[in-house]
Amino acid sequence: MVTNDGTDGAPLVADVMDPQCPTRVVLDRIGDRWTTLVVLFLESGPLRFTALRKAIGGVAPKVLTQTLRAMERDGLLIRTVHAQVPPRVDYELTALGRSLLEPIHAVTAWAERHVTEVLDARDRYDETAAAHP
C-alpha cells in the first residue's frame, strides 16, 4: 500500500517488515489489549467512560483514559462532551474504528477456538522449563 507521508510529498511505501515504517505504530495501537476490547464494546454504540470501564473490567481508570486518548488521536473513536451538569462524555467508534471490527472478530474467534491448545502448550513449556533449568 502506498500513501503520502505528508512531509515532502514523496510517497510512503508501507512495509510492516521495515523497522522504520510507521505501520508498526498502527499495529502497536490495534494490538493493544485494551484497544481491542474498547472496539468490541463500542460496536453496539456509544458508551460513557464508567460504562465502558465496567464492561471491560480489570482496567485501571488511568490506563483506560490513556487508551481512549490514543484511540481518539489515531482517529478510531470520537469523544463527545455534552454540556450538562455533571458533564457527560460519550465515546463512539468512527468509520475507521468500525473497520477494525471484522479483523478483531476474526482474531477473537481464533482465540476462543484455540484457547485450550494455547493453555496446554504453556503448561507443557512451563513443566519442561522447570524440569530443565
Image: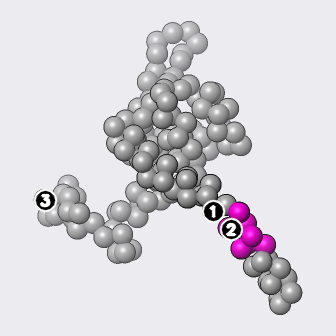
Disc sitting over residue 117 in the figure: 2
Mark 2 burial class by Cα count in 10 Å: few <14, some 14-19, many 20+: few
Residue 13 in percent (x, y) is at: 23, 68
Sequence-earlier tag: 2 or 3 = 3
Amino acid tagged 2: Glu
Amino acid tagged 1: His
Residue 49 in percent (x, y) is at: 58, 29
For the N terminus, which image quadrant? bottom left
Q: List the residue tagged with mark 1.
A: 114
Nearest to the observer: residue 2 or residue 85 = 2
Mark 1 burial class by Cα count in 10 Å: few <14, some 14-19, many 20+: few
Q: Is residue 99 above or below residue 117?
A: above
**Residue under the image location 62 percent in, 44 percent down:** 63
Tell whether label 2 touches label 1 (CB within 8 Å).
yes
Residue 93 in percent (x, y) is at: 42, 35
Q: CA distance from mark 1 to mark 2?
A: 5 Å
